[in-house]
Structure formats: structure tokens, C-alpha cells
Image (spheres, coloured by chain):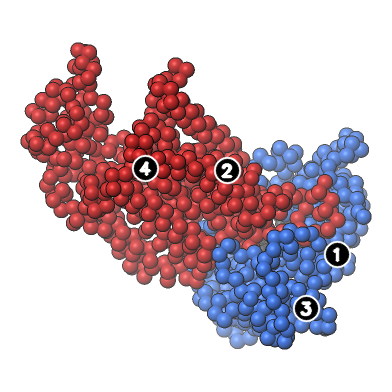
């Protein structure tokens, strides 16, 4: 069993190594016809750029994106500089250089990787999946009888911020940096999943497709791990199945198929304001232009945020979204589960959390108000501030850096819910409802708590669950995503997530059940 | 009705101008609960003394540190700033002697401290019954932080520690077995009784735990006593000899977990009356005015109800702390605990108990036992044979609601009621398979009744007794 695990690990690492090396490998050779197509599609009017590429790129072999990308970027800069100088505004190219490089790279990729997509998929994703499963599946036997399986978490360098944890951190952060800021280096990755993308939407894959596919793959493999680890806890089994379903079907497959059917790309479960660009002009325009389905999506998006979300939170708590449906939550609960103990439980962290998350909520609301104002009054600025500038700042700082690079990249260091806890504006909104108008609570079982601290340690949201449990108080906190792990790890059966009457949901206590009834009554009722 | 203080009264504020100094020896759950409640009720000066650790930690969680579930800092229920903010002074020192005439504590390092009121909350220490070799290196209890450090040193892994022998089959013994098991260190578990913890657990449950222990590859030896611990040439544990068979078992660590005794040796030189523990009356007062004792180290002159005179559990320490705070703040209140409850975990099996279930039913009592046909899930309900009054329940592998059982005990519900409303009491996580119908069916079959089960009702759950 141990041997299978070790072989699996080696296989996984080989797959990972090949995947990691891919951005710097491969040959690229752009032919004239393809380039002309790009020029036409992108409506490029800059002859400076066109000539530059034709002389320096077309027909030549490039080894690895690192040799091609700088030339394209330079050509772009030179062209734009010249046009700016000559005030030829219509010739300026506004496409980002990494997007241009990605576009050209994708068309010009040839050589081994481009010609052996299936094989390369097997050598990367394939080995990764097989290796990971070989590593995970033996746990059915190795973990022994069902029960809580947290032995050695703080002895293992992967889960105790040791060197493996830091390596994972570096890998994840780099991956997100490539994805958001240097997507041309993802070109080879897109090739691997081209066949899948073509089967779904009919189009070749872009880097976001790679991301989506990887997301689903990672979640599925890590869900297997969840099933094994928490096999005694049916709540975890159901919840994991649910997030997996919503990720694969709603976030991944349906949008791709909609594209195939000439409909807008839309994830029906992604609610504003997490889906922060829902009200951006380009999105509204595209929805309105598509007519029927577009209008439906528009109405659905608004109804989802204003009606469905709060009503569901009233009945079930924000968990129905955050740990049963949401994609960010889904990754956190599968890939992120080994890191949940790293969330900071201090009062200070709680303070930071409240400032930060509400600032982001305010930010998104102000931005959306500006966006809508601009949209309806047809101006680009509000009170002298450019709407598009605000939008790009949000997209960059919150959408990319916070949600992606920090949110996921920092899993091994700050825990798996950094984004959900400190940043997500939807979570902030759901949190208000959960705190002030909901039937959900975590009931504390009378006086049974022994203050051991398992619950607090494993709360991914950094809630000091014990602080409530040891006072006999129910846990009613806006940030609780209802993952149910505090309840699972409690060795004394103290915690139960449940939906019940609002009356008595919040029950501040001083004296716990089990003591003198007079003392309890008087002190608690005060 | 009893008068209860809830917040500092102006009268009290006036009194505390003199800043009465409350000194608590012991920073465990009882001492800390007391300090917190005194602070809520008054402005008195509070000092907590402990020789063990700088800050309060949860003893019950020591096992999880060794097993790698938590770091030691996670066992500390309050952040370090908490004490200063609440003006609770912490002093790390070992009290050597109490001079109750001068109201002075003397420390092992030579210092001393005056008190106005003194609370002894020094907890327990592991029992050692005079076995030869019990003080060798590698023979350790599992009570204090230092025991954990020792275990980490003597049994870091199964290379250094090829086998450990645990002596004494109680709750701490089985925790120690689980700890060592988590590092794949082979364990031999010597239990004096003929079945695990059968002084407390009814037969069926005790048997189930025996099997569960064996299923974890722990070498459980029932009806087996320790004769002596043998030393190697360096004064370290080498092996143990079994009393009954004379068998020698080679091992590197011996865990002495045959119960605990009040940790009160340092009180012996004082005028405070001692039995096994510090003798206290219902008000937790000792024979000396202004000296009190709470928690594991306190011994009631007369046991309260079915409770033992010394109650060495977490919850009772906490309750004594809650109660004594009232007395110390001017509202003399007797310690009057409510219905008994407790809980534990045997490896993977959670155990809860509410009310009284004795290993052997007492006179006029009977047990109703239900066990899952396959899983380690069972319950035992104790009731009065004549009146059918519900007396208590043990549950294994099913979580139950404390509030509900507390209410049913107060209301003196009978078996028929408890059995048919059992769904109200279930506290398992959502979507768990429930067994109330199966339990009820067996009850009906056994007692020839025709009870029907009631659906869970929030209204009943939240209604007060
Ligand atoms: C491993 C383990 C698991 C347990 N699990 C459970 C459980 O699941 N449920 C349950 O109900 N109970 C459990 N218990 C029992 C429970 O922990 C104790 O009942 C409880 O901690 C007692 O609290 P206390 O405040 O009375 O004393 P303690 O927690 O023992 O605190 C007393 C403190 O006083 C210090 N002290 C003693 N003498 C002196 C001196 N002369 N000078 C200075 N300081 C001194 C000690 O070093 C200690 O720090 C467990 C105990 C152990 C050891
Ligand atoms: S409080 Fe419990 S259910 Fe809520 S997020 Fe924390 S661990 Fe999950
Ligand atoms: S895990 Fe359970 S017993 Fe431990 S502190 Fe939390 S609620 Fe209390």
C-alpha cells in the first residue's frame, strides 16, 4: 500500500514537472496566412507592427515562448510609440502585449507538442491524475477505521508550513501570475486541452479554458480525497458532491455549450457581486444584443442576487452558497482542505477581516453604481473619475490579485479561505443576512465543551468556535460558511449545524448547563 | 429563591477600594473560570499562580498535540493579551507552604505573597501505587504539560520507542494508547478489570470498547496487573513484569494512567484539613476562613447525590469556579450541580452520558440496551423498574442533546415518553442515518408496548423545563 502511494507520488511529480516545464518548451513558427488572419480578425491597422512581425517573426523558428514573446512585445511597443508620436490614434493597438503574444503563439505553435496533443495531455494531466489517485486511494485502507483523520498534520512539512508547503505556495502563485499577467506562457497548456475545448464549444482552448479544466480536474481528484478522509461524515460527503457538481456542470460545461449554441458565456450560479463584471457595459450590451437568452440571463442575475440568495440564506445560512455551490468555495473545500488549519484565529485577524471584506463590498457597489450611471447616461466619467479606470483597478487588485494570486496561492500559508474570509463581497453580503436574519446557527450542546480547541484549529474561516462553545453559546457569525468541519472534529459532540427558529438562536450565556439551575437562570437572564 | 450577582454593585465597588486580593493557586479550568467570573462581578485584585505553564491551557487537548492535530498554542483558550486586559495577574511559581495565620504563601524559589482570600485549585497528579521502578526514566503519567514533553522525548517515534506499556484502563489510559498508536508505536495495554472501564460502563458497552481497542491493533490485556518495571543500566525503563503470569514485556516507555489523586502535598504542612483532597463544605469553604478549594483537588465532606466526593472532571471544575465566584463576591452560594453529564472518546467512538447509568443496575433499576447490528453504535438507558422513570442514558456513536435530557430528567419523564420523543434529542450532524425508529422497535418488542415515534419538534426542543 505504502509502495503504491510512493509510486503514485513519483508519477504525479513527473506529470507536474512536465506541466511546469511546458511554458518554456515547444517550437513556434508563424506562417504568413495565419498572421494575415490575425491582422484581419483583430483589425490591426498599424503597418509598422505588421511589417515588424513579418520581417522578424513570420517564417522563423522560435524555441520556446521566451524567445518569441519579447519580440512581439517590442514590436508592439515600437509601433505604438511611433503612432503616438505621429498622433495616428486609429493605428494604435490596444491589445495587451501578452494577449497578442498568446494569440500569435497559439497560431504558430508547431512541433512535438502541437502535433501530439493527446500524448502530451496524458504526460501531464494524465500522469497527474493517475499519480494523485494512486497516492490518495490507498488511504481507504491505510487510514484505518473511519473517524477523524488529522494525525500528523502538524508534523508534516506539507501541512505545517514546512518546505513542501512553501513549494506548493510558490507553484500556485506562479501559476496564477502566468494566468493573469503572462498568458502567452500558457500557450502550450492550451494545446493540451484543445481537443476537449473543441468537443465542447467548438473553439480551440484559451488559457481560461485551461484554468477551468484544471479547476475541475483538481477538484475531482481532491474530492476523492475528501470522500475517503471524511467517509464517516455524510454531511461532508454530500457537500463535496454538491460543490463538485456545480463546478463541473454549471461553471464549466454549461457555459461552454452555450458558446457552441451562440449564446453568451454565462455561469448561472455565479452571483453578483462575486461576478463583479456582470453589470459592466460590455456584458450588458452583449446580453441585450443576444436577445431572448441574454435578457433571461440579465433578469436571472438580478433575481439571483436580490431574491434567491438572501431567501436561501434565511433558510439555510450562507453555507448553501459558500460551501455547497460556489466555485471558490469548492476549490477551498477540496484542494484547500489540507490547509484549513492555517487560518488566523486571533481577534486581530477578525478585525482585519471586517475592515477588508466590507471595504471590498463597498468598492464593488460604488464601482457598479458608477458603471450603471455611465451606462444609462452614456458618459465615461462620474464626478470626474473615469469609470473604466475604477473597473480596471478592481479587476486587477481584487479580481486577479486578491481572489486568485492571494486567495488560492496562499492556501498553504494562510489557509484555504483567504479570499472568502477577507475579500469576497458576496460573502460579505450573505454574511449580513446570516448574522441578522437567518434560521442558521451552530448549536452548542449545553455544557459538554472541554475547550480542547479542535474546532477553532480546523475552522477555515478563522472563527474561534471554542470561544463560544466553552461558554455554551451558539455560534452565529457572519463569516461562517457552514463547512461543518468544526462539528466533525469535535471529540465531544458539542457542535451541530442546524436551521431552526430564529427565537433563541443567539443565546449569550455566562453559566453553562449542568450547574445550579438558579445560578444559571439568574446570571444568564440578567 | 437564591440571590445571584450578575454585575458589580456599587456597594461592591466601594468595598474593593481596599482592593481585596484574591489569590488562586492553579491555572486550570477551575481556577481560571473562577477568576473570569470574579472579574465580571467585581474589581478585586486577582492573582493566579501556577508552576506548570505561563498561560491556561486545556489539559484535555494534550493528546492532540502529540498526535499532530494541534500545536500546543492551540490548546490555550484565551489569547495572551486576555489576562492583562482583564487585570488577572499571572505568576509562575511553585507554592511550597501556606501560612494561614499570616495569610502568606511561600514559594519554592524563596519568594512569598500575601492574600486576603485563597483558593486552592491545584488539580490532580497521576496515581503511583508504589510499583518498583515507577520513577525510572521513561515511566510517566499523562497529566501535566511536562508529561507531554517527556513523552515527546521518550517516544518520538517507533524507532526510539519500540513498544510502550500502559498501566491502567481509564479514560486517560485509552487516550495515551490512541496517542502512541498515532505514531505507530506498538502498545500493550494492561487493564486490571476483566473488561475495559467496566466499573463505569455496562457490560455491552464495555465489550464493544474492548473490541474496538483490539481492532486498532492495541495489545489489550484484561485482568492483568503490573508487578514491576525493570531498569536498564542507565536507569531507563527496559521492561515490565506482569503480576499474574510473570511475563516480561520489553518496552521503552511505561504510561502510568491508573487514575489520579488530588495534587495537594504542599498543603500538608498547613492547618487546612485534608482527606484525599482538600476537605470542603457545600460552599467550597475549607476549615480555615477565607480559604477555599475547587476542581479536582476539592473533596466534599459528603458526596452530593450520586456524585463522588472528589469529582475529577472538567465540567465540575468549571461549575465550582462559577459558583465560588458568587461567594467570593459577597453572595454566599452553595455548590449545587444539576444533573450529571459527561463525555469522552474511545479512539473513534464518541461517548456521552446524561443522568446516571451504572455498570450494574441498582435496586429497582433496569437497563434497556440497543446496539447497531454492525457499527459501533449503541445506547443504554437506565430506568426505574417500578415507575418506569427515566434515570439516565449512555450513548456511543450517537450524539444527543444535553438540553433535552437535562429537561427530561428535571421533568422526571418516563421511558415511554423518552423512547417516543427520542428524535428531539438527536444531535448528530445533518443527513446522518438515524436509529430512533429501530431503537423504538426494539423497545416495543422487549416491553410489549406499542409506542409510536414523534417527529422532531423545534417547539419542544426549545421549550424550557
Ligand atoms: C489527558 C487528560 C484528558 C482529560 N480529558 C477529560 C475529558 O475529556 N473530560 C473531562 O471532563 N475531564 C477530562 N480530564 C480531566 C480534567 O482535565 C481535569 O478534571 C481538570 O483539568 C482539572 O482542572 P483543575 O482546574 O481542577 O486543575 P488542573 O487543570 O490540574 O490545574 C491545576 C494547576 O495547578 C498547578 N499546581 C499544582 N500545585 C501547585 C503548586 N503547589 N504551586 C503552583 N501551582 C501548582 C498545576 O501544575 C496545574 O497547572 C482529562 C485530564 C487529562 C490529564
Ligand atoms: S464555524 Fe464551523 S462550519 Fe463555520 S466555517 Fe468554521 S468550521 Fe466551518
Ligand atoms: S472541538 Fe468541541 S470540545 Fe473541543 S473546544 Fe471545540 S466545541 Fe469544545
Considering the numbered disc 2 on the image, is that residue within a helix, a strand or a loop? helix
Mark 1 = which residue?
B300
Where's residue B458, x and y in %? 70, 60
Cα separation, mark 1 vs mark 4, equals 79 Å
- Tell me the mark number nearer the camera, choosing from 1 and 2: 2
As drawn, the chain in blue is B
Mark 2 = which residue?
A431
Considering the numbered disc 3 on the image, is that residue within a helix, a strand or a loop? strand
Label number found at residue B383: 3
- Mark 4 vs mark 3: tell me if same chain: no
Left or right of residue B14: residue B144? left
As drawn, the chain in red is A
Considering the numbered disc 4 on the image, is that residue within a helix, a strand or a loop? helix
- Tell me the mark number nearer the camera, choosing from 4 and 3: 4
Cα separation, mark 1 vs mark 2, equals 49 Å
Please report, as a chain letter, where disc 1 is located.
B
- Tell me the mark number nearer the camera, choosing from 1 and 4: 4
Mark 4 = which residue?
A292
Q: Are marks 1 and 4 in contact (CB under 8 Å)?
A: no
Please report, as a chain letter, where disc 2 is located.
A
- Tell me the mark number nearer the camera, choosing from 4 and 2: 4
- Tell me the mark number nearer the camera, choosing from 1 and 3: 3
Amino acid at each position: 500500500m505504502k509502495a503504491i502511494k510512493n509510486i503514485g507520488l513519483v508519477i504525479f511529480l513527473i506529470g507536474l514537472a512536465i506541466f511546469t516545464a511546458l511554458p518554456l518548451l515547444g517550437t513556434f513558427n508563424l506562417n504568413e496566412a495565419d498572421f494575415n488572419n490575425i491582422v484581419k480578425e483583430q483589425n490591426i491597422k498599424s503597418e509598422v507592427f505588421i511589417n515588424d512581425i513579418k520581417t522578424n517573426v513570420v517564417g522563423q523558428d522560435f524555441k520556446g515562448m521566451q524567445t518569441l514573446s519579447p519580440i512581439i512585445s517590442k514590436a508592439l511597443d515600437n509601433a505604438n510609440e511611433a503612432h503616438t508620436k505621429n498622433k495616428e490614434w486609429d493605428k494604435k493597438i490596444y491589445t495587451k502585449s501578452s494577449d497578442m503574444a498568446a494569440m500569435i503563439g497559439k497560431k504558430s505553435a508547431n512541433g512535438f507538442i502541437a502535433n501530439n496533443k493527446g500524448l502530451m495531455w496524458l504526460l501531464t494531466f494524465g500522469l497527474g491524475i493517475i499519480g494523485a489517485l494512486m497516492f490518495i486511494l490507498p488511504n481507504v485502507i491505510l487510514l484505518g477505521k473511519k473517524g477523524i483523520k488529522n494525525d500528523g498534520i502538524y508534523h508534516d512539512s506539507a501541512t505545517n508550513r514546512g518546505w513542501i508547503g512553501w513549494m506548493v505556495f510558490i507553484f500556485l502563485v506562479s501559476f496564477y501570475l502566468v494566468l493573469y499577467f503572462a498568458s502567452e506562457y500558457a500557450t502550450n497548456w492550451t494545446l493540451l486541452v484543445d481537443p476537449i475545448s473543441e468537443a465542447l464549444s467548438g473553439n480551440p482552448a484559451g488559457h481560461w479554458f485551461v484554468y477551468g479544466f484544471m479547476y475541475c480536474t483538481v477538484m475531482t481528484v481532491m474530492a476523492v480525497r475528501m470522500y475517503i478522509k471524511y467517509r464517516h461524515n455524510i454531511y461532508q460527503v454530500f457537500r463535496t458532491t454538491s460543490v463538485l457538481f456545480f463546478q463541473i456542470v454549471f461553471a464549466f460545461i454549461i457555459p461552454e455549450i452555450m458558446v457552441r449554441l451562440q449564446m453568451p458565456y454565462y455561469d448561472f450560479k455565479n452571483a453578483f457581486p462575486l461576478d463583479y463584471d456582470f453589470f459592466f457595459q460590455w456584458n450588458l450590451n452583449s446580453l441585450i444584443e443576444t436577445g431572448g437568452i441574454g435578457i433571461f440571463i440579465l433578469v436571472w442575475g438580478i433575481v439571483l442576487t436580490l431574491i434567491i440568495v438572501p431567501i436561501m440564506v434565511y433558510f439555510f445560512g450562507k453555507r448553501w452558497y459558500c460551501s455547497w455551490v460556489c466555485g471558490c468555495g469548492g476549490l477551498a473545500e477540496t484542494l484547500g482542505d489540507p490547509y484549513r488549519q492555517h487560518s488566523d484565529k486571533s481577534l486581530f485577524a477578525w478585525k482585519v477581516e471586517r475592515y477588508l471584506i466590507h471595504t471590498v463590498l463597498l468598492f464593488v457597489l460604488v464601482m457598479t453604481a458608477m458603471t450603471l450611471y455611465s451606462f444609462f447616461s452614456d458618459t465615461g466619467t462620474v464626478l470626474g473619475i473615469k469609470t473604466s479606470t475604477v473597473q480596471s483597478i478592481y479587476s486587477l487588485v481584487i479580481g486577479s490579485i486578491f481572489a486568485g494570486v492571494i486567495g488560492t496561492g496562499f492556501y498553504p500559508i494562510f489557509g484555504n479561505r483567504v479570499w472568502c474570509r477577507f475579500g469576497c463581497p458576496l460573502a460579505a453580503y450573505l454574511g449580513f443576512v446570516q448574522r441578522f436574519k437567518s434560521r442558521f446557527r451552530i448549536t452548542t450542546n449545553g455544557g459538554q465543551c472541554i475547550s480542547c480547541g479542535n474546532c477553532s484549529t480546523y475552522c477555515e474561516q478563522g472563527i474561534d468556535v471554542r470561544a463560544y462553545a466553552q461558554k455554551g453559546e451558539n455560534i452565529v457569525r457572519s463569516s461562517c460558511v457552514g463547512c461543518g468541519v468544526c462539528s466533525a472534529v469535535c471529540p465531544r459532540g458539542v457542535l451541530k449545524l442546524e436551521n431552526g427558529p430564529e427565537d433563541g438562536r443567539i443565546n449569550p450565556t455566562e453559566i453553562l448547563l449542568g450547574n445550579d439551575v438558579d445560578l444559571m437562570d439568574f446570571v444568564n437572564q440578567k | 429563591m437564591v440571590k445571584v450577582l450578575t454585575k458589580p454593585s456599587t456597594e461592591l465597588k466601594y468595598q474593593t477600594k481596599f482592593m481585596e486580593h484574591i489569590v488562586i493557586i492553579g491555572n486550570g479550568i477551575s481556577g481560571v473560570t473562577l477568576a473570569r467570573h470574579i472579574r465580571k462581578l467585581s474589581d478585586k485584585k486577582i492573582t493566579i499562580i501556577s508552576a506548570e505553564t505561563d498561560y491556561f491551557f486545556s489539559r484535555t487537548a494534550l493528546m492532540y498535540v502529540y498526535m499532530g492535530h494541534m500545536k500546543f498554542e492551540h490548546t490555550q483558550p484565551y489569547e495572551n493579551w486576555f489576562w492583562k486586559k482583564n487585570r488577572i495577574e499571572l505568576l509562575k511559581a511553585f507554592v511550597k507552604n501556606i501560612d494561614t495565620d499570616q495569610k502568606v504563601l511561600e514559594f519554592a524559589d524563596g519568594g512569598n505573597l500575601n492574600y486576603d482570600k485563597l483558593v486552592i485549585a491545584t488539580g490532580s497528579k497521576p496515581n503511583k501505587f508504589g510499583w518498583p521502578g515507577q520513577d525510572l526514566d521513561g515511566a510517566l503519567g499523562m497529566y501535566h504539560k511536562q508529561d507531554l514533553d517527556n513523552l515527546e522525548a521518550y517516544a518520538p517515534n517507533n524507532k526510539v520507542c519500540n513498544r510502550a506499556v500502559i498501566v491502567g484502563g481509564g479514560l486517560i489510559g485509552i487516550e495515551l494508547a490512541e496517542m502512541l498508536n498515532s505514531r505507530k508505536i506498538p502498545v500493550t495495554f494492561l487493564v486490571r478489570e476483566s473488561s475495559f472501564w467496566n466499573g463505569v460502563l455496562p457490560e455491552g458497552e464495555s465489550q464493544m470498547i474492548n473490541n474496538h481497542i483490539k481492532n486498532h491493533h492495541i495489545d489489550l490485556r484484561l485482568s492483568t496487573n503490573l508487578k514491576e518495571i525493570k531498569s536498564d543500566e542507565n536507569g531507563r525503563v527496559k521492561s515490565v513484569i506482569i503480576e499474574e503470569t510473570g511475563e516480561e514485556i520489553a518496552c521503552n516507555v511505561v504510561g502510568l494512567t491508573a487514575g489520579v489523586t488530588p495534587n495537594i502535598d504542599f498543603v500538608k504542612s498547613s492547618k487546612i484539613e485534608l482527606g484525599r483532597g482538600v476537605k470542603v463544605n457545600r460552599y467550597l469553604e475549607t476549615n480555615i476562613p477565607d480559604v477555599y478549594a475547587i476542581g479536582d483537588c476539592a473533596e466534599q465532606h459528603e458526596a452530593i447525590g450520586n456524585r463522588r466526593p472528589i469529582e475529577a472532571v472538567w465540567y465540575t471544575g468549571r461549575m465550582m469556579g462559577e459558583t465560588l465566584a458568587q461567594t467570593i463576591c459577597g453572595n454566599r452560594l452553595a455548590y449545587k450541580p444539576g444533573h450529571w453529564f459527561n463525555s469522552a472518546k474511545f479512539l473513534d467512538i464518541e461517548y456521552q452520558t446524561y443522568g446516571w447509568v451504572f455498570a450494574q443496575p441498582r435496586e429497582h433499576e433496569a437497563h434497556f440496551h440497543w446496539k447497531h447490528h454492525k457499527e459501533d453504535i449503541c445506547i443504554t438507558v437506565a430506568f426505574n423498574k417500578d415507575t418506569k422513570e427515566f434515570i439516565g442514558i449512555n450513548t456511543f456513536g450517537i450524539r444527543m442533546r444535553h438540553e433535552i435530557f437535562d429537561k427530561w430528567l428535571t421533568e422526571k419523564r418516563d421511558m415511554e415518553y423518552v423512547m417516543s420523543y427520542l428524535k428531539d434529542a438527536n444531535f448528530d450532524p445533518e443527513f446522518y442515518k438515524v436509529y430512533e425508529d429501530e431503537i423504538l422497535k426494539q423497545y416495543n418488542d422487549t416491553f410489549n408496548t406499542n409506542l409510536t415515534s414523534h417527529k422532531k419538534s423545534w417547539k419542544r426542543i426549545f421549550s424550557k423545563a
